Image: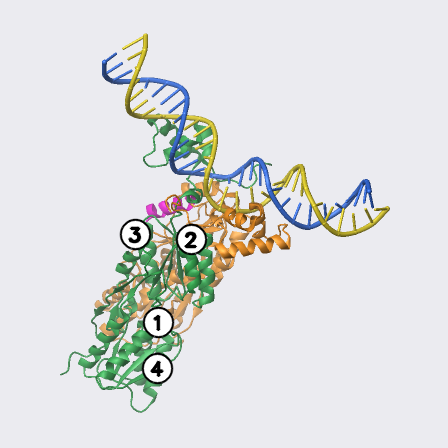
Chain colours: A green, B orange, C yellow, D blue
Amino acid sequence: MTDLQRRPFVSARMVAERAGVSRSAVSRTFTDGASVSEATRRKVLAAAGALGYHVNHLARGLRENSNIVCLVVADLTTPIRAGLVDELTRKLQAASKITMVINTESDDESVATALRQTLNYRADATIVLSGTPPASLIETCLANGQQVILINRADHLQGSQNLGVDNAMGAREAFFLLQRAGCRRLAVVTSTARTASLLQREDVFVEAARKAGLDVAVTRAGPTTYASGLEAGRRLFGRSDGPDGVFCVTDLLALGFMDAARQEFGLRIPDDVCVVGFDDIEQGGWESYRLTTFAQPLAAMADHAVDLLAEPHAWGSERKLFEPLPVWRRSVRANSR
Amino acid sequence: MTDLQRRPFVSARMVAERAGVSRSAVSRTFTDGASVSEATRRKVLAAAGALGYHVNHLARGLRENSNIVCLVVADLTTPIRAGLVDELTRKLQAASKITMVINTESDDESVATALRQTLNYRADATIVLSGTPPASLIETCLANGQQVILINRADHLQGSQNLGVDNAMGAREAFFLLQRAGCRRLAVVTSTARTASLLQREDVFVEAARKAGLDVAVTRAGPTTYASGLEAGRRLFGRSDGPDGVFCVTDLLALGFMDAARQEFGLRIPDDVCVVGFDDIEQGGWESYRLTTFAQPLAAMADHAVDLLAEPHAWGSERKLFEPLPVWRRSVRANSR
DNA sequence: AGTTCTCTTGCACACATGTGCAATGAACAA
DNA sequence: TTGTTCATTGCACATGTGTGCAAGAGAACT
C-alpha cells in the first residue's frame, strides 16, 4: 500500500511470475506464430485473465511501427468533414490502425504545431484534412519515415501523397447543368476562405461561362457556412436583376442561399432560380431542399487513403483525383430547350 | 543503405553524439526544470534542430502517464455527436492530452472490443459517448487505474464517472411549453433505439401529460434519424385526427417530422401543429425550420469531463447533471390562454 | 543404446526515454 | 592555499515489449 505508488497497469512480468514461466513465454503467447507449447499457453492465458493483462502497444511500438495514424482536421462539425472523419476512422480501425485526432484551427501555424505533435507520437502517417502545412515540416516528417497524406488540399507539395475530388470537373458539369436549364444570369456563391479547392471550383465555373459568352457575379459573404449562403442570397437578390442560375461551391452555402431566396424573397426553386451545390451532405437531401449537387465519393477516397498506408512509401509525390458524382434532385429545372 | 533497415526516427542518442554530450543532457534539455547549463543546452538544441529530433512521447509514456484519452463513439456524422467530439477534442488538446478516437458500432459487443483496445494503449481515461460497456470490463479498466467517463449514458455503473444532460427536466419543460400553447392532442416522436436517454425523455413527457389528464400517442418509426422523423409524420397525420402538439426526443427527428407535416400534408407550423425538439443542433436554427428546442450545453459538459481527468479519481461513482437550455424559436405558438 | 531432429524455453539485448546518485569541477570564502 | 558549496554531468537503472541465440528435453530412427 505504501510502496505500490501509482503503477497499476499489470505487465507481462507479473503474469509470468503468477504463471510460473518466463516473461518470454508470456510475450510469445500473445504473438502470432511464435513457438509456445499448448500447456504453457494455457497457464499464461489463465494468469493473464485473472490479472486482467493487456499487451502494451506503446511499448511494442518502440521496436516496430506504432500503427498510429494522425488525423489533422479543423471544423469537425461541418457535415462534410464529419463524414470524412467518420469514413477514415472506420477504415483505419478495420486496417488495425489507431487514429489520433488533432482538432486544430485551420490557420497554417496551428497545423504546423499539430504536425509536430504527430512526430512526438511516432505516428506512421499523418492525414491532413484542413489547412496547409509548411513544406519544410513535411520534409521533416518524410525524413523521419512518416507518410504525409493530404486530402483535398490542392497544394502539390513535394513528397506528400495527395488525393481529392476533381473540382474542375465538378465545376464544369455544374455550369453545363445550369446552361442546359436555360439560365442566363449566372452567379457563384463562395466564401472568404481562399482554399485551393474552393478557388478552383469558382475559377473553372467562371471560365466555362465566359467561354459560352456569359458573365458571372461572384459573391463571398463570409466563411464557408450556412449563414454566409444566406447573406449571399440577400446581397444577390437585393439588387435589381437577381440571378436565375447559381453555383454554390459548397452545399452548406447552397442551403443558406436557398432559404434566403425562398423565405425572404418569395422565389421558387427551380422555377425562378436554379441552384447547384457541391459535396452532397445529408441535409441537401432533406425535403425542404432537395438540392441538386455533386457528391464527393468519401468512401472511395477513404479507401484509397488507407491503401496508401499499406504501400511502400512512393517518393515521387503523386496525386489521385476522384470524379464527383452528380446527384439529381429538384433544385434545377429539367432541360428547357 | 543495406543495414539501415526501417528505423528512420532520430533518437536522443543520435542528438547526443552529434552535440558531443551525454544522452542524459539531451533528455534534460527537453525536460522542464532539469539542470542543464546554458552552453550545453544550446549545443543540444542546435543538434536537435539539424537532425529534426522530436521527443518520443510513447517512450515517455512507459514510465509515467501516457496522457492519452480514448473517445469511444458511434454515429460520428450525427450533428450532436460531431459537436460533442469537437468540443472534447478541442478541450483535451488544450489540457495537453492526446485524443484517440475509436469509431465503433453502438452495439455493446463492439464497445467492449473498443474498451479493450483502450487498455492496450494505456490510455489514462476512456470517455464513452455511445453504447454501454459491460460492467466487468469497466471494472478491469478501473483496476488498471484507468478512468471511465460516461456521457449521456444513464446507466449508473459502479466506479464509472457519469455526466449528462437532465433529460427529465427537458421533457417536463417540453410538456409545459406545449400545454401553455394550448395543444390538446399530444404525440411523442422517438426512435426504435431504446437508449436510456431517449426512453427517459419519452417517459417523463408521457407521465407529465397523464398527470394533466392528456393522452399521448407514441410513434417510433426507425433509428434516430431525419428519415424516421419523416416517416413518423406520415404515420401520425395519415390517421383521421392528427396531433396538434408534438415532442420529438431529438432535433433530427423533429426536422424530418416538420418536413412531413409541411411538404406532404400542407400543415402550417406552429399554427396547425406545434413542435418541440431536443439537443439544439445547428440545422434546427436554419430558416426553413426555426425549431424551438432544448440545448445540451456541450461546452460545459466537455469542460466538466476534462476537469474530471485532473481530479484524483474519486471512487464512489458520481453523476453530474446539466440543465438543458430552452431555445425559443418559431415552432411553438405564443401562449394562447 | 546412440544419434539426430524437432519443439520449447530462458537469457540477454534492443527500443527511447526520465531520473537518482555520485563524481567532477568551478567559484568563493577563510 | 585550502576547504566548502553548488551547479553540472555522466552512469546506470527502470519502464514493457519482441526476438535471436543457444541450451535443454524429448521423440524418432538406426
- How would you rate the neighbour count of disc 2 (Cα within 10 Å): few for under 14, some for 14-19, many for 20 or more? many
Above or below residue A190? Residue A21 is above
Residue B106 highlighted magenta (yes or no): yes
Q: Earlier in the sequence, mark 1 or mark 4?
A: 1
Quarter of the picture holding the C terminus of chain A: bottom left
Q: Earlier in the sequence, mark 2 or mark 3?
A: 2
User: Is label 1 in a helix, a strand or a loop?
Assistant: helix
Residue at 63% in and 55% down: B38
Q: Main secondary structure of the magenta part?
A: helix
Q: Earlier in the sequence, mark 1 or mark 3?
A: 1
Question: Residue D22 location in percent, x, y?
Answer: 41, 25
**Front position among marks 4 and 2:** 2
Left or right, residue B128 beside residue A5: left
Q: Mark 2 near mark 3, Cβ–Cβ under 8 Å?
A: no
Return the residue at label 1. A196
Closer to the camera in the image, A318 or A25: A318
Left or right, residue B85 beside residue A301: right
Return the residue at label 2. A144
Q: Amino acid at mark 4?
A: Thr
User: Is label 2 in a helix, a strand or a loop?
Assistant: loop
Q: Mark 1 near mark 4, Cβ–Cβ under 8 Å?
A: no
**Chain name for mark 1:** A
Return the residue at label 3. A311
- How would you rate the neighbour count of disc 4 (Cα within 10 Å): few for under 14, some for 14-19, many for 20 or more? many
Question: Residue B168 location in percent, x, y?
Answer: 42, 59
For the residues beneath circles 2 and 3, the answer to whether they share a chain is yes
